[in-house]
Image (cartoon, grey):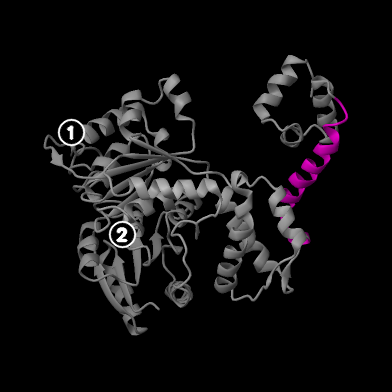
């Protein structure tokens, strides 16, 4: 339930109008004009909802949104901006905003969005007893691979070792990073998660290490970076392989010297953080190509954790499916009893390239469109069924021909020269298929 709202808006007239409007509708409202003020206000009294402008004097609203979600994930967030575009909306939602509204504001539309956010919070509160992960509503698998993973988490968490987490997209890398933080001696400190994949090359140093006023065009106020915000806690750098070589050098120095130097400053600031990094890329290849520094790699890789894919832990698929069904029933106000046996069998035949995140999304969609008491196989997404059918044909197809060139030609003909489908049938990746087509001079 939303009662307290914090407005962050440097347009004093608009801020006053919003505060008056929302107060009349029964909300307790506080307003500030900068992110620095917003952080101070939040630490004094955590709001139920933040209504923030995108562009603020000392930083961006998205930067504050990420800080809020790391420190107070339960707080709802609505972004407002006069620079309305799809990219900003997507970035806001991806970073954890409940919704997005464009200026000039329609007060009735804003009120409706706040009421929707309140309903969403109520649903979450009603079902707090459900153990879910903040990123993927994640539970522990029963497979040997997962048992070994959580055994290693318990071993490394109490130490101060830098941890590198490897795993494909959607396996729950941030979940594991948060779990390490929660089990560590730093669990009273902040956990700051940073997606290095969205850091711009020009502003990455400012985002990570901060900047001082006047350091570059647009730096109209001092800014604390992610390292400073994570002081005495844990900094999680997701997709670390995306950092430029220049930033890698600065990162290495910060980790070795335990100091940071904001952009434009000559003053060094001591920091005390525990670093957890993650990647779904092949850093070994990046090392061989010299796009990732070997000295930094060894500094962040004091302890390596590998998160298995869903394909590697097929025995856990049914466990996850029922867990996500329970959550979707609650969030969508449905009463689906379960899955037909055929549906569960088809789940096990699919490769799940998006891993746990993809399974969760598929279950959520199927629960939404299911009219009966059970989820049936005819409700499976088309891409999932297409792959399963290809794999079924692959079994009989693979027995027909032992000649590799002929098998490739046959797979291409069956798939109507769809390279992705042919690669699935041949149990190879697309790059390998293209190389073999070139080797055998097979034309499209």
In the rendered view, tell whether residue 273 sits above or below residue 256.
Answer: below
Asked where in the image residue 187 lies, by quadrant, the reply is bottom left
Mark 1 or mark 2: whose residue is earlier in sequence: 2
Residue 388 drawn in magenta: yes
Looking at the image, which residue is at 30% across and 31% down?
299
| Number of numbered tags placed on the structure image | 2
| Mark 2, secondary structure of its residue | helix
In the rendered view, tell whether residue 295 sits above or below residue 278.
Answer: above
Between 210 and 434, the residue placed more toward the observer is 434
Q: Which of marks 1 and 2 is in front?
A: 1
Mark 2 lies on residue: 71
Give the side of residue 42 with respect to residue 109, left or right.
Answer: left
Looking at the image, which residue is at 35% across and 29% down?
297
Asked where in the image residue 257 lies, by quadrant, the reply is top left
For label 1, count other residues whose C-alpha is less than 10 Å away and answer few (under 14), some (14-19) or many (20+). few
Between 324 and 11, the residue placed more toward the observer is 324
Picture coordinates of residue 383, whole percent (x, y): 72, 48
Looking at the image, can residue 203 be seen?
no
Looking at the image, which residue is at 21% across and 42% down?
211
Contact? badges 1 and 2 (CB < 8 Å): no
| Mark 1, secondary structure of its residue | helix
Question: What span is colored magenta in the figure?
Answer: 378-401
Residue 57 drawn in magenta: no
Give the side of residue 357 with respect to residue 373, left or right.
Answer: left
In the rendered view, tell whether residue 399 sits above or below residue 32.
Answer: above
Q: Distance between the residues labelled 1 and 2?
A: 26 Å
- Residue at the far right: name it: 400
Looking at the image, which residue is at 81% across and 30% down?
412
Picture coordinates of residue 386, whole percent (x, y): 76, 46
Mark 1 lies on residue: 257
Q: Quadrant of the N terminus?
A: bottom left
Magenta stretch, main secondary structure, is helix
């Amino acid at each position: 339930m939303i009662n307290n709202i914090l407005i962050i808006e440097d347009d004093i007239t608009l801020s006053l109008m919003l505060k008056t409007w929302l107060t009349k509708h029964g909300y307790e409202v506080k307003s500030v004009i900068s992110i620095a003020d917003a952080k101070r206000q939040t630490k004094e009294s955590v709001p139920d909802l933040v209504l923030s402008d995108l562009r603020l004097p000392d930083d961006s609203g998205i930067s504050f949104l990420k800080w809020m979600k790391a420190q107070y994930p339960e707080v709802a967030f609505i972004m407002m901006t006069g620079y309305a575009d799809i990219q900003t909306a997507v970035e806001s939602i991806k970073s954890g905003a409940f919704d997005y509204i464009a200026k000039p504001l329609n007060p009735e539309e804003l009120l409706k969005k706040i009421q929707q956010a309140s309903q969403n919070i109520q649903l979450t509160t009603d079902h707090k007893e459900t153990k879910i992960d903040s990123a993927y509503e994640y539970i522990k698998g029963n497979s040997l691979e997962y048992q070994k993973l959580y055994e290693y988490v318990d071993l490394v968490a109490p130490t101060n070792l830098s941890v590198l987490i490897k795993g494909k997209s959607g396996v729950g890398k941030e979940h594991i990073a948060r779990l390490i933080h929660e089990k560590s001696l730093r669990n009273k400190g902040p956990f700051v998660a940073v997606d290095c994949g969205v850091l711009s090359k020009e502003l990455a140093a400012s985002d990570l290490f901060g900047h001082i006023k006047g350091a570059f065009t647009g730096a109209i106020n001092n800014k604390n970076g992610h390292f400073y915000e994570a002081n005495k806690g844990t900094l999680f750098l997701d997709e670390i392989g995306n950092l430029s070589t220049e930033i890698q050098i600065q990162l290495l120095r910060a980790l070795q010297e335990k100091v940071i130097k904001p952009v434009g400053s000559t003053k060094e600031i001591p920091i005390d953080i525990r670093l957890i990094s993650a990647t779904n890329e092949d850093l070994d290849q990046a090392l061989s190509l010299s796009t990732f520094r070997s000295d930094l790699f060894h500094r962040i890789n004091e302890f390596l954790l590998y998160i298995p894919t869903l394909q590697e832990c097929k025995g856990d698929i049914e466990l996850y499916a029922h867990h996500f069904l329970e959550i979707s029933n609650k969030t969508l106000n449905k009463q689906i009893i379960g899955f037909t046996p055929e549906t569960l069998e088809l789940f096990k035949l699919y490769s799940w390239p998006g891993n746990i995140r993809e399974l969760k999304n598929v279950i959520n969609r199927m629960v939404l469109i299911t009219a009966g008491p059970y989820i049936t196989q005819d409700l499976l997404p088309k891409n999932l069924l297409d792959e399963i059918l290809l794999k079924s044909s692959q079994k009989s197809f693979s027995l027909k021909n032992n000649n590799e060139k002929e098998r490739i030609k046959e797979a291409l003909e069956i798939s109507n020269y769809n390279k992705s489908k042919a690669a699935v049938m041949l149990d190879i990746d697309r790059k390998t298929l293209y190389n073999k087509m070139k080797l055998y001079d097979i034309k499209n």
